[in-house]
Image (cartoon, rainbow, N blue to C red):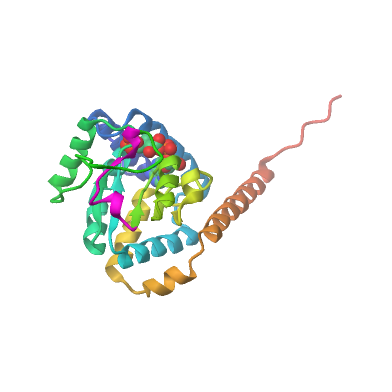
Amino acid sequence: MTTVPETHPRYRSLIKRERIIEFWKKGIVADAGLIAHGRGEAFDYIIGEATMPFAEDAERAAVAYLLTAHRPVISVNGNVTALAAREVVELARLTGAAIEVNLFYRTQERAEKIAGVFRSLGMEILGVHPDAEIPGLDHARAMCSRDGIYSADVVLVPLEDGDRAQALVAMGKTVLTVDLNPLSRTARVAHVTVVDELTRAMANMVRMARERDFDPDGVIASYRNDETLARCLLHIKKRMEELGVSCLPRHRPPEPRA
Ligand code: PTJ
């Protein structure tokens, strides 16, 4: 692993990148996971690399749904395992959720390696030997566990593909996601979209689940995901305008030609 100096202004971002590469080398992150991570980084840059109020509200709503669910499940893939396995385990323990490995680029080897990471954290996970299918998807992408995602009422699917998010909504589940791209199909079809970087989002959700200083039913009743997405896009617009204006003092009009 490359050593990243702690004094580097982008230390935290670079550490996450190193972790994704390390887990890709271990065969846990898919090749496409590297690309997905880069897309996330780009959106995080645009948003400001911090948890914004619209994300915090969505995180609280997601925790509220998990706490009040009958059969909550947290779905994990390669990237989520690389970046936030510990936080996933903690959130699962605090909310009573099961954890299920659910891969877009599924191979048995990767599913087993991911289960191994969670086992080393003291948690057995579902989905290694799937026995059910999500309707409407091709076989490999549909595979899931009957006692897990298939019969869940609430599923947290961070960094999810749009087709699968849509298929879970069609099954009548409440779908919660973490996705830095507010324009993705997943972001738009989910019931709760946390537009925040995964490690920040998970740490916040663990804290919220531990403190429980809110009324989950009240939070759910007043939550509107369309408002979350609108607030996010308007935040990006405002930030780009402010950054654009801040460039102007340095702009010199061209010298007139002789
Ligand atoms: O491990 P697998 O086989 O299940 O594959 C996982 C990936 C992520 C490769 C797969 O699900 C995929 O291709 O996902 P997408 O369609 O690229 O969507 C991933 C979304 O997550 C994109 O919108 C990214 O912007 C976003 N994203 C990437 N990294 C982060 C993120 N959002 C929050 N935090 C991140 N660290």
State the count of labels. Answer: 0
- In reply to whether residue 149 is colored magenta, the answer given is yes
Farthest right residue in view:
258
Work out which quarter of the rendered image holds the C terminus and state it.
top right
Residue 48 visible in image: no
Work out which quarter of the rendered image holds the N terminus and state it.
top left
Farthest top residue in view:
258
Which residues lie in the magenta part?
Answer: 139-153
Q: Position of residue 176 (x, y in %)?
A: 40, 55
The answer to whether residue 155 is above or below residue 131 is below
Answer left or right for 61 relative to 46. left
Instruction: Find residue 257 and report its image quarter.
Output: top right
Q: Position of residue 250 (x, y in %)?
A: 66, 41
Please state which of residues 67 and 59 is positioned toward the viewer in this rendering.
Answer: 67
Answer left or right for 189 relative to 63. right
Q: Residue at x 19, y 39 (%)?
A: 129
Q: Position of residue 143 (x, y in %)?
A: 29, 39
Q: Residue at x 32, y 68 (%)?
A: 68
- In reply to whether residue 88 is colored magenta, the answer given is no
Residue 71 visible in image: yes
Q: Quadrant of ligand 1?
A: top left
Instruction: Find residue 97 and report its image quarter.
Output: bottom left
Q: Residue at x 21, y 60 (%)?
A: 93
Q: Position of residue 3 (x, y in %)?
A: 27, 35
